[in-house]
Image (cartoon, coloured by chain):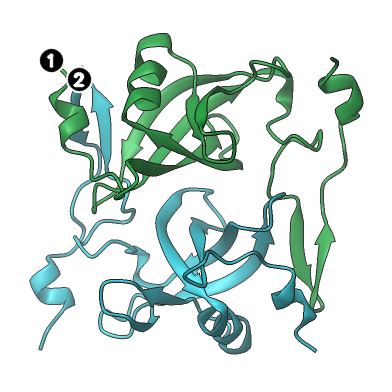
Chain colours: A cyan, B green
Amino acid sequence: MNSWLNEIRFTSDGLIPAIAQDAKTGKVLMFAWMNRESLHLSVEEGYAVYWSRSRGKLWRKGEESGHKQKIVSIQMDCDEDVLLLKIEQEGGIACHTGRESCFYRQLIDGQWQPIESVLKNPDEIYQK
Amino acid sequence: MNSWLNEIRFTSDGLIPAIAQDAKTGKVLMFAWMNRESLHLSVEEGYAVYWSRSRGKLWRKGEESGHKQKIVSIQMDCDEDVLLLKIEQEGGIACHTGRESCFYRQLIDGQWQPIESVLKNPDEIYQK
C-alpha cells in the first residue's frame, strides 16, 4: 500500500530533506526534515508534518503558530533523497521570525541583508 | 573580508544544503550541498560550485554537461544553515537525467509518476 515510501532513500538517520514552496507564487518558504512517519502522516493528513531534529519529535507545522501548510503536491528528485512540497501557507507566514519565508536574508555587497519584513511579531504568534 | 561566510552554520561535516531555483520562473531545479570553499568560489566565479559528497570533491556544476548555473542571488534561512540560490540555468537542463528539474516525479495516486519529459538524452549530454 505504501510502496512509494519504500522508494525513498532516507539518510542513515532515517531522514529526508523537504523544501516547502508556495504552490501559487513559487516562493520557497522553508526547508525542514521528514522521516518516514512524518511523511506518511503528511500525506494522510494533507498538511505538512516534519521531524524536528532539535526536539527529536514529530512537528506538525503550525501546531503552535497556526501557520499550517496544506499540501498541494509532493515531488521527489532524481536521487530519491529530497522532497519538494508545494503548499498553501496558512496565515501567509512560514518563518518563526514572523516573516513569510525563512530565506529572508540575501547576500548583498558581502553582507547578509534582510529583504523581507516581519509580518507579525513572534511574541504574538507563539502565545503561551 | 569574508565575514559573511562565518555567519553560516555548516554541518559537522562542513556542509550546507543549497536549493537551486530558476530566477525567472521560480521553478525549483535541484538540491545539492556546498562547503565553505565551494560557496566562496560560487560567489567569486558567479556560477554555482557544489561539493560532491559521492565524489568527495568540488563540483563546478556544468563542468561536464555545460549546464552551468549563473548565480543571480543567494539567500540564507533563519537558522543560517540552508541556502537558496536563484540562478539562470544554462541549456535549460539542471538534471543529469536530461530534464529541466531534478524534481520530475510527483506522488499521484500513491505512485511516483514522471511529470517532466527528458529534453536531451543523457548520452548526448555526457560525451566522453
Going 73% across and 75% down the picture, which residue do you hit?
A6
Compared with B32, B1 (above or below) is above
Going 41% across and 73% down the picture, which residue do you hit?
A90
Say left or right for B71 vs A86: left
Q: Position of residue A5 (x, y in %)?
A: 70, 76
Kindly report the distance in space between the C-alpha atoms of the residues bearing marks 2 and 1: 8 Å
Q: Position of residue A99 (x, y in %)?
A: 25, 56
Q: Nearer the viewer, residue B56 or B127?
A: B56
Q: Which residue is mark 1?
A: B1
Going 82% across and 78% down the picture, which residue do you hit?
B109
Quadrant including the C terminus of chain A:
bottom left
Judging from the image, mark 1 belongs to the subunit labelled B
Judging from the image, mark 2 belongs to the subunit labelled A
Q: Is residue A112 visible?
A: no
Local secondary structure at mark 1: loop
Compared with A47, A100 (above or below) is above
Q: Which mark is residue A110?
A: 2
Q: Quadrant of residue B15?
A: top left
Say left or right for B76 vs A117: right
Q: Report if the CB atoms under discs 2 and 1 are less than 8 Å apart.
A: yes
